[in-house]
Image: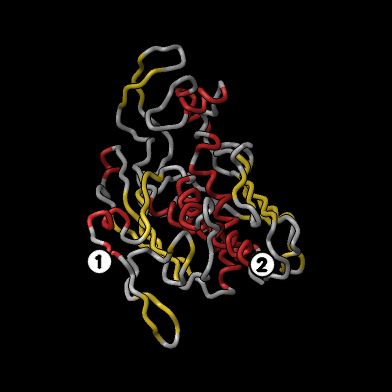
C-alpha cells in the first residue's frame, strides 16, 4: 500500500507537492457534530507557515485553508473532510541547475532508486512543505481533544548553532513535547502500542532523527528501584509518584503527562559548497540556492503536535469502540 495514509479509525490521506498547484488532506472517520470552521484550521497553519522568524525560509505563502467537504453549518458531518491550501509563491527556477543532481542529505537519490525519477523542484513529496496537510488534519484532531481537556505543548530544549544561517549553513535541535491530561487507556497491545504508533507518527516527519519517552536512554543507566514509578493516591485518584515512563506503561496511557523528546536534524539545503554526483555518474560541486529554513525547529513543532494529536484521536476512537 502506498504510504500516504495514516491511522485506522481516524484516517488521514495527504496529497500534493512542494511546487505543485496545491496541497491537501482528506480526513475520514471524524465524528459528527463537532464545531469546526476554517478559523480553527488557520490558527494552526499560521504557526508553521514560511516567512516567520530569522531561521525560516523567506518563501511567502499565506497558506489560507479552504474546507471543501465534510462540514455543514460549522459542524462536522461525519463524512470525509477535505481541505486544500494553494501554492502561491513557488519559484521553480531556483532548482533548474539541480535537475540531474543528487543533493546531499535529500531524498533525491532514494526516490530515484524507488521510482526511477524524482521531483527536483523543491523535493516534491519529500519536502517539508508536505507537512502543511498534516497540520490541517492535526487542527481537527486538536479540536476533538479539547473536549477531553487534553493539551499538547512543546518547548525547545536546544538549538546548538542559532547563527548558522549567516555562515550559509544550518542547525538541528531538540524539542520536548508534552501531552497534558491525556485520555487514559489508549493503546492497543501488542503491536499497536501507543508509544509505538506515536513513534511511527513522529518519525514519519522528515528531519526527525531520534526520540525518547520519559527518561528514555537515561533509564538504561538506572536500577529498577529508581526507574519504576511508584503508585500513590492523590485527591482520591491513582497517580504515579514520578513519571519516568513518560505517561505510557505496557503501551497504554496511564493518565500522566506523555513526555517525548525529539531530535531534529539540520536542514539539508545549505548555501555552502558541497560535493556530490549527478545522474550521469559524474562528480559535481553544488550550492543550494533558493529559499530554505536554516533550522526546522520553529516550524516543525506544530507538525509534531499535529501528528501526536492525530495518533491520540485515532486511539481514542479505537478505545471507545472497545470499551463503551
**For residue 91, above or below residue 27:** above
The type of colouring in the image is secondary structure
Drawn side of residue 115 relative to residue 298, left or right: right
Choose mark 1 or mark 2, whichever is in front.
1
| Residue 134 x, y percent position in the rendering | 56, 51
Where disc 1 sits, the SS reads helix
* Dot 2 crowding, Cα within 10 Å, few <14, some 14–19, many 20+: some
| Residue 198 x, y percent position in the rendering | 48, 54
Nearest the camera: 66 or 236?
Answer: 236
* Dot 1 crowding, Cα within 10 Å, few <14, some 14–19, many 20+: few
| Residue 21 x, y percent position in the rendering | 64, 39
- For disc 2, the marked residue is 36
Look at 39% across and 83% down and name the residue there: 233
Earlier along the polypeptide chain: callout 1 or callout 2? 2
Nearest the camera: 192 or 297?
Answer: 192
Look at 55% across and 55% down and name the residue there: 135
Where disc 2 sits, the SS reads loop
Quadrant where the C terminus sits is bottom right
Look at 50% across and 56% down and name the residue there: 193
| Residue 237 x, y percent position in the rendering | 45, 83
Residue 322 badge: none
- For disc 1, the marked residue is 226
Drawn side of residue 144 relative to residue 252, left or right: right
Numbered marks: total: 2
Q: CA distance from mark 1 to mark 2?
A: 45 Å
Quadrant where the N terminus sits is top right
| Disc 1 + disc 2, Cβ < 8 Å | no
**For residue 59, above or below residue 122:** below
Amino acid at each position: 500500500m502506498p504510504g500516504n495514509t495514516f491511522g485506522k479509525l481516524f484516517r488521514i490521506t495527504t496529497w500534493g507537492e512542494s511546487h505543485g498547484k496545491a496541497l491537501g488532506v482528506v480526513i475520514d472517520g471524524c465524528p459528527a457534530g463537532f464545531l469546526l470552521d476554517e478559523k480553527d484550521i488557520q490558527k494552526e497553519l499560521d504557526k508553521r507557515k514560511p516567512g516567520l522568524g530569522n531561521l525560516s525560509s523567506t518563501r511567502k505563502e499565506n497558506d489560507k485553508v479552504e474546507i471543501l467537504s465534510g462540514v455543514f453549518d460549522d459542524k462536522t458531518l461525519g463524512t470525509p473532510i477535505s481541505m486544500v491550501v494553494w501554492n502561491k509563491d513557488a519559484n521553480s527556477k531556483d532548482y533548474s541547475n539541480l535537475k540531474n543532481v543528487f543533493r546531499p542529505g535529500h531524498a533525491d537519490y532514494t526516490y530515484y532508486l524507488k521510482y526511477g525519477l524524482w521531483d527536483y523542484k523543491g523535493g516534491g513529496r519529500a519536502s517539508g512543505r508536505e507537512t502543511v496537510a498534516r497540520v490541517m488534519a492535526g487542527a481537527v484532531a486538536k479540536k476533538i481533544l479539547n473536549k477531553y481537556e487534553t493539551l499538547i505543548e512543546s518547548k525547545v530544549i536546544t538549538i546548538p548553532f542559532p547563527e548558522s544561517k549567516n555562515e550559509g549553513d544550518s542547525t538541528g535541535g531538540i524539542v520536548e513535547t508534552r501531552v497534558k491530561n491525556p485520555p487514559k487507556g489508549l493503546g492497543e497491545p501488542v503491536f499497536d502500542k501507543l508509544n509505538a504508533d506515536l513513534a511511527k507518527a513522529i518519525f514519519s516527519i522528515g528531519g526527525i532523527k531520534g526520540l525518547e519517552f520519559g527518561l528514555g536512554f537515561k533509564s538504561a543507566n538506572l536500577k529498577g528501584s529508581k526507574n519504576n514509578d511508584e503508585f500513590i493516591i492523590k485527591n482520591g485518584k491513582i497517580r504515579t509518584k514520578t513519571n519516568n515512563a513518560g505517561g505510557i506503561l505496557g503501551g497504554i496511557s496511564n493518565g500522566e503527562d506523555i513526555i517525548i523528546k525529539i531530535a531534529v536534524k539540520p536542514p539539508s539545503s545549505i548555501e555552502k559548497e558541497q560535493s556530490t554526483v549527478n545522474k550521469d555518474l559524474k562528480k559535481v560541486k553544488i550550492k543550494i540556492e533558493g529559499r530554505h529554513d536554516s533550522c526546522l525547529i520553529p516550524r516543525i513543532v506544530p507538525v509534531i503536535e499535529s501528528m501526536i494529536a492525530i495518533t491520540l484521536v485515532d486511539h481514542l476512537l479505537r478505545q471507545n469502540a472497545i470499551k463503551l
